[in-house]
Image (cartoon, grey):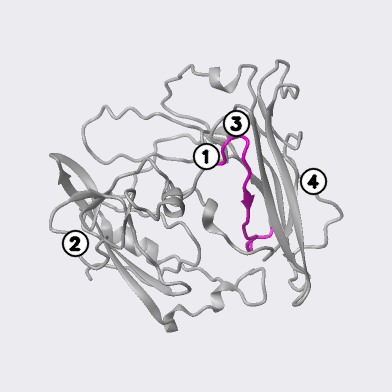
């Protein structure tokens, strides 16, 4: 949300709430995000991020299916631009099915340790019954740790063999990779006495596959709308495109690199969104030159952008050519896992 803690940041959240099939109303929230030193969570003055002078920030009170989805601000590196000081941005997003209480917070540079966060309530639609009696009142309680020293000055490092992580807490941990090359695992468990249980064999791929296949997801249970996601049948859709992505290792300029179809992504200095808007990508990325069905003969760097068919259904096949686990992060919406296994 922010790239600097200096100056004043302004942006707006635009929310269009659907009241009926033919009538709707637009509700606009203008947020003034700034740094103040007059609000002291502890006894000593320090910098606090406020929204409209409030800490925590104002409540976003919403109902399931409010607003359309816009993935501009999904925080994928290079695909969007931060809100610069003195500028504004209208942030459009969709309230999803999960009714309950949530929070918003700055997502980069760990700014959330000095504020900028607040509550979100997602209410059920009137046509959807909930499994508990109607609430008499609802209170949003945000709990956090604060220190007398400014967050930028807390730099003393502590060496630990174990670390207690309590509910809602997050830590940044530096791990010294000073041991022999091998597979290691971390254990996250409640406090207990006795030896640490033995972990699974990291080379037992069959164990991992069987474990994944044993998990089923009933998308129709407790859904927050009359036509829950489980009613969408992905077996009868018409595919518009198919991408086959091979994850493997390659060598570029004498250095080992992880590659996809023998292309190693090189982060450009200009964000892709800016390049697309002002120079149509010229000199920044290569459009539709990425091999979506094959593997290039030699590994090379590349900044690739692939065109997708508007409103089309895309099939993505991930092939792991490594001898270890290969993990992917899909950022967007509307993904469905339809199958996995060995071979082609």
- Judge left or right: residue 18 versus residue 257: right
Between label 4 and label 2, give the one nearer the viewer: 2
Which residue corresponds to mark 2?
295
| Mark 1 neighbour class, 10 Å CA radius: few under 14, some 14 to 19, many 20 or more | few
Q: Main secondary structure of the magenta part?
A: loop
Sequence-earlier tag: 3 or 2:
3
| Mark 4 neighbour class, 10 Å CA radius: few under 14, some 14 to 19, many 20 or more | few
Rounded to the nearest whole Å, what is the CA distance between mark 1 and mark 3?
Answer: 25 Å
- Magenta span contains residue 20: no
Between label 1 and label 3, give the one nearer the viewer: 3
Sequence-earlier tag: 2 or 1:
1
Sequence-earlier tag: 1 or 4:
4
Name the secondary structure under disc 4.
loop
Rounded to the nearest whole Å, what is the CA distance between mark 3 and mark 4?
Answer: 22 Å
The structure residue drawn at horizontal position 62% and vertical position 40%, both measured from the top left corner, is 87
Rounded to the nearest whole Å, what is the CA distance between mark 4 and mark 2?
Answer: 55 Å
The structure residue drawn at horizontal position 29% and vertical position 68%, both measured from the top left corner, is 341
Which residue corresponds to mark 3?
113
Rounded to the nearest whole Å, what is the CA distance between mark 3 and mark 2?
Answer: 44 Å
Of residues 307 and 341, the one nearer the viewer is: 307
Which residue corresponds to mark 4?
139
Between label 3 and label 2, give the one nearer the viewer: 2
- Magenta span contains residue 93: yes
Image quadrant where residue 160 sits: top left
- Judge left or right: residue 189 versus residue 42: left
- The segment highlighted magenta reads 82-99
Sequence-earlier tag: 4 or 2:
4
């Amino acid at each position: 949300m922010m790239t600097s803690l200096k100056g004043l940041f302004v942006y707006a959240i635009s929310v269009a709430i659907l009241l009926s099939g033919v009538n709707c109303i637009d509700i606009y929230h203008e947020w003034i995000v700034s740094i103040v030193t007059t609000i002291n969570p502890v006894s000593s003055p320090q910098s606090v991020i406020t929204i409209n002078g409030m800490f925590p920030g104002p409540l976003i009170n919403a109902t399931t299916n409010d607003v359309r989805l816009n993935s501009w601000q999904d925080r994928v590196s290079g695909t969007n631009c931060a809100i610069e000081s003195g500028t504004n941005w209208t942030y459009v997003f969709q309230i999803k099915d999960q009714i309950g209480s949530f929070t918003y917070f700055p997502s980069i540079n760990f700014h959330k340790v000095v504020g900028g966060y607040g509550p979100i309530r997602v209410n059920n639609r009137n046509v959807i019954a909930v499994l508990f009696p109607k609430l008499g009142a609802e209170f949003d309680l945000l709990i956090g740790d604060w220190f007398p020293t400014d967050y930028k000055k807390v730099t003393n490092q502590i060496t630990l063999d174990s670390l207690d992580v309590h509910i809602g807490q997050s830590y940044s941990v530096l791990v010294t990779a000073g041991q022999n090359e091998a597979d290691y695992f971390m254990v996250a468990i409640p406090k207990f006495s006795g030896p640490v249980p033995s972990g699974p064999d990291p080379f037992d791929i069959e164990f991992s596959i069987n474990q994944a296949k044993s998990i089923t997801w009933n998308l129709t249970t407790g859904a927050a709308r009359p036509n829950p996601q489980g009613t969408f049948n992905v077996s009868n859709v018409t595919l518009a495109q198919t991408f086959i992505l091979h994850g493997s290792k390659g060598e570029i300029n004498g250095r080992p690199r992880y590659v996809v179809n023998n292309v190693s992504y090189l982060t450009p200095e200009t964000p892709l969104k800016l390049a697309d808007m002002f120079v149509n990508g010229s000199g920044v990325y290569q459009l539709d030159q990425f091999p979506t069905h094959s593997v290039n003969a030699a590994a090379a760097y590349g900044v690739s952008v692939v065109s997708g068919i508007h409103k089309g259904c895309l099939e993505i096949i991930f092939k792991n050519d490594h001898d270890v686990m290969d993990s992917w992060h899909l950022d967007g919406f509307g993904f469905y896992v339809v199958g996995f296994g060995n071979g082609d």
